[in-house]
């Protein structure tokens, strides 16, 4: 059976159905945004009988595709009329034509700079019949008072505020193109039935107004039997507004049909999540995806318990299709466990020196992490279980496995990691897939890289202290001391001709460490052998304690004291690799190399942006 019909309807028939509420919008459609010039353009296209493109409608009545609906902007319905069709594509065109032609009210639009305007639309009848002019030049818009003024409003250039002024200036109101008889009768009276004026009118009516009367609009009607996924996919493919809808917006419309306000609920959850700085960038789709992941996980577990086998077992998934099919019942059931999972994740990440969303290697990895924690519950408080969880986390970070489409990996992570932790099951695929090449450290230069952020966190692992204040870098001092990552051998020193250290070496993570802003200012651009004595003097500590403070940054002070950049560089590289090995619980072969020109996706984006 065909999933759609293709036909043609008269423009007036469509606009009448809009006015009566037989044609409405799904609530996920965004507001009307066309500006004044585009409205004049589409009116001119109708007047010239030019095509303006097909519109796409969806039949209502499908039990699996229930959207909250709303009338087209400007339509007032008092009787709760249920629509027979919903506009999927063509909202801007239909709304513009409805407001300009049928509403009989001033049109609220915008100019090309985005400022709000209130406009009436007219057809200059003389220009419309002038063969030397493009008919588009005859379409004008005028302010809400129906006047065109000059000299900062002091002089009235054109006044159409009374109907007789319209007759005198031969300006026909677009809002009456669908009902011209009354205007024409008064027009005749105004000109005392002058024969030339009647001929002029008839010519105008035949050339212009009949174009509106006879205009046929191509219409594609999606049948109500189409599944929700198909409806949403078609909408996005044909949407001429150019703004892609999110799963959240589509679910908002679906849940609204069950009298549940998903937007309002999200705002409450967002406020709760944003109390934790690591979670600041978690968005509404992340939450939906995590809820879908755990909902399908438990559906699979329940199916297995009831004896279902083989292909009949539902899959764990959080792809778009499954998210769109998330029921309100499952959303409400798993929302709180997932929100708590995100919050628990933030606490564990803070324990591992990831203090803010800016420092989080992958925001995307929070999705499976929150679901895993929701399943584990209090069992994550076991130190052995937490150690396993962080091994999985660091393998994802240093294997750089969450930088693109991740839905398939999420679906493996949740059952595999929980099985591995709770039942000592097989090692998760994410751990198996993770590899780190030592030369990758040479290419980690900005926060655009997940591995860069991961190394930054590992550098604060063993009671790392700021060189100047000698205070441990933790959540409190991270913010109070304005901790950030800074160069150890300063850029200015490295670039001096006598040192000539290449940027690829001095600007990578190996030559950087977390320090306070105050400490970095004292470092200035001097050689380490010079600035270390200044910092020690300001810190007021003896040599032994100062050496311990320096070593807490995973480095050997003797190379700094002798300004031996490459001695320092090679020693620190090895120490960082050992930390990464410990975090991943995997051995890193030291002879693996990646070429300098091969950059990870995030860094390519940073370079080209």
Image: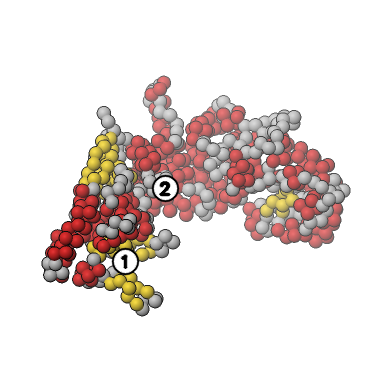
Residue lying farthest right? 562
Q: Nearer the viewer, residue 57 or 128?
A: 128
Is the residue marked by circle 2 packed among few (<14), some (14-19), or many (20+) residues within 10 Å? Answer: few
Query: What's the residue at 39%, 62% (across, down)?
Result: 111
Query: What's the residue at 21%, 46% (across, down)?
Result: 10
Q: Which residue is mark 1?
A: 142
Up-down relation of residue 197 to residue 363 (above or below)? below
Q: Is residue 360 visible?
A: yes
Query: What's the residue at 24%, 60% (across, down)?
Result: 175
Asked whether disc 1 touches disc 2, contact meaning CB atoms under 8 Å apart, the reply is no
Q: Which residue is mark 2?
A: 243
Q: Where residue 75 appears, x then y in whole percent?
A: 25, 56
> What colouring method underlies this structural image?
secondary structure
Q: Where residue 439 appears, x then y in whole percent?
A: 72, 36
Q: Where residue 158 appears, x then y in whole percent?
A: 30, 71
Q: Nearer the viewer, residue 387 or 112?
A: 112
Q: Nearer the viewer, residue 271 or 85?
A: 85
Instruction: Determine which quarter of the picture holds residue 328.
Output: top left
Find numbered disc 1 in the image and state the secondary structure of the residue it sits on.
strand
Instruction: Determine which quarter of the picture holds residue 319.
Output: top left
Find numbered disc 2 in the image and state the secondary structure of the residue it sits on.
loop
Q: CA distance from mark 1 to mark 2?
A: 30 Å
Is the residue marked by circle 1 packed among few (<14), some (14-19), or many (20+) residues within 10 Å? Answer: some
Position of residue 104 in the picture relative to residue 587 (left or right): left
Position of residue 594 in the picture relative to residue 24 (left or right): right
Position of residue 482 in the picture relative to residue 418 (left or right): right
Q: Is residue 377 visible?
A: no
| Mark toward the viewer: 1 or 2 | 1
Q: Where residue 376 appears, x then y in whole percent?
A: 51, 37
Q: Earlier in the sequence, mark 1 or mark 2?
A: 1
Position of residue 209 in the picture relative to residue 564 (left or right): left
């Amino acid at each position: 059976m065909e999933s759609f019909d293709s036909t043609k309807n008269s423009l007036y028939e469509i606009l009448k159905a809009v006015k009566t509420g037989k044609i409405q919008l799904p609530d996920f459609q965004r507001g009307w945004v066309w500006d004044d010039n585009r409205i004049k353009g589409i009116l001119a296209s109708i007047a010239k009988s030019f095509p303006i493109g097909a519109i796409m409608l969806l039949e209502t009545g499908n039990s699996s595709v229930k959207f909250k609906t709303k009338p087209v902007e400007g339509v007032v319905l008092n009787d709760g009329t249920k629509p027979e069709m919903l506009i999927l594509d063509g909202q801007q065109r239909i709304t513009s034509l409805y407001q300009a032609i049928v509403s009989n009210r001033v049109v609220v639009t915008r100019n090309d700079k985005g400022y709000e305007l209130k406009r009436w639309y007219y057809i200059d009848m003389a220009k419309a019949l002038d063969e030397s002019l493009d008919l588009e030049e005859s379409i004008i818009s005028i302010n809400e008072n129906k006047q065109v003024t000059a000299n900062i409003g002091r002089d009235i250039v054109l006044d159409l505020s009374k109907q007789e002024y319209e007759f005198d200036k031969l300006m026909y109101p677009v809002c009456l193109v669908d009902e011209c008889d009354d205007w024409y009768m008064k027009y005749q009276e105004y000109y005392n039935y002058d024969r030339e004026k009647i001929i002029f009118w008839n010519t105008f009516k035949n050339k212009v107004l009949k174009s509106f009367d006879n205009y046929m609009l191509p219409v594609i009607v999606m049948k109500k039997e189409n599944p929700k996924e198909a409806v949403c996919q078609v909408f996005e493919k044909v949407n001429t507004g150019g703004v892609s809808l999110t799963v959240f917006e589509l679910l908002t419309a679906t849940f609204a049909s069950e009298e549940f306000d998903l937007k309002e609920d999200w705002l409450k959850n967002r406020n709760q999540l944003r109390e934790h700085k690591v979670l600041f960038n978690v968005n509404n789709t992340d939450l939906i995806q995590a809820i879908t992941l755990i909902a399908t996980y438990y559906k699979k577990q329940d199916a297995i318990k009831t004896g279902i086998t083989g292909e009949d077992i539902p899959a764990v998934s959080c792809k778009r299709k499954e998210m769109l099919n998330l029921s309100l019942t499952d959303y409400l059931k798993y929302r709180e466990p997932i929100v708590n999972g995100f919050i628990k994740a933030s606490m564990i990440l803070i324990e591992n020196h990831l203090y803010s969303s800016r420092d989080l290697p992958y925001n995307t990895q929070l999705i499976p992490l929150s679901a895993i924690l929701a399943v584990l519950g209090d069992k994550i408080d076991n130190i052995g279980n937490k150690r396993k969880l962080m091994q999985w986390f660091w393998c994802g970070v240093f294997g750089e496995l969450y930088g693109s489409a991740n839905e398939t990996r999420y679906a493996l992570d949740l059952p595999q990691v929980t099985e591995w932790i709770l039942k000592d099951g097989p090692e998760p695929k994410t751990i198996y897939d993770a590899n780190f090449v030592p030369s990758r450290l040479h290419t980690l230069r900005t926060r655009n890289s997940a591995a860069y952020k991961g190394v930054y966190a590992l550098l604060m692992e063993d009671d790392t202290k700021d060189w100047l204040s000698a205070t441990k870098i933790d959540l409190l001092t991270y913010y109070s001391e304005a901790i950030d990552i800074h160069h150890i051998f300063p850029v200015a020193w490295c670039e001096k001709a006598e040192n000539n250290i290449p940027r690829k070496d001095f600007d990578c993570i190996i030559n950087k460490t977390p320090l306070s802003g105050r400490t970095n200012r004292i470092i200035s651009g001097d050689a380490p052998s010079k600035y270390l004595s200044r910092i020690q003097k300001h810190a007021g500590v003896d040599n032994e304690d100062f050496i311990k403070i320096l070593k807490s940054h995973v480095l050997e002070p003797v190379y700094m004291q002798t300004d031996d950049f490459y001695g320092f560089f090679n020693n620190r590289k090895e120490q960082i690799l050992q930390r990464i090995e410990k975090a991943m619980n995997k051995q890193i072969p030291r002879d693996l190399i990646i070429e300098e020109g091969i950059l990870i996706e995030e860094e390519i984006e940073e370079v080209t942006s």
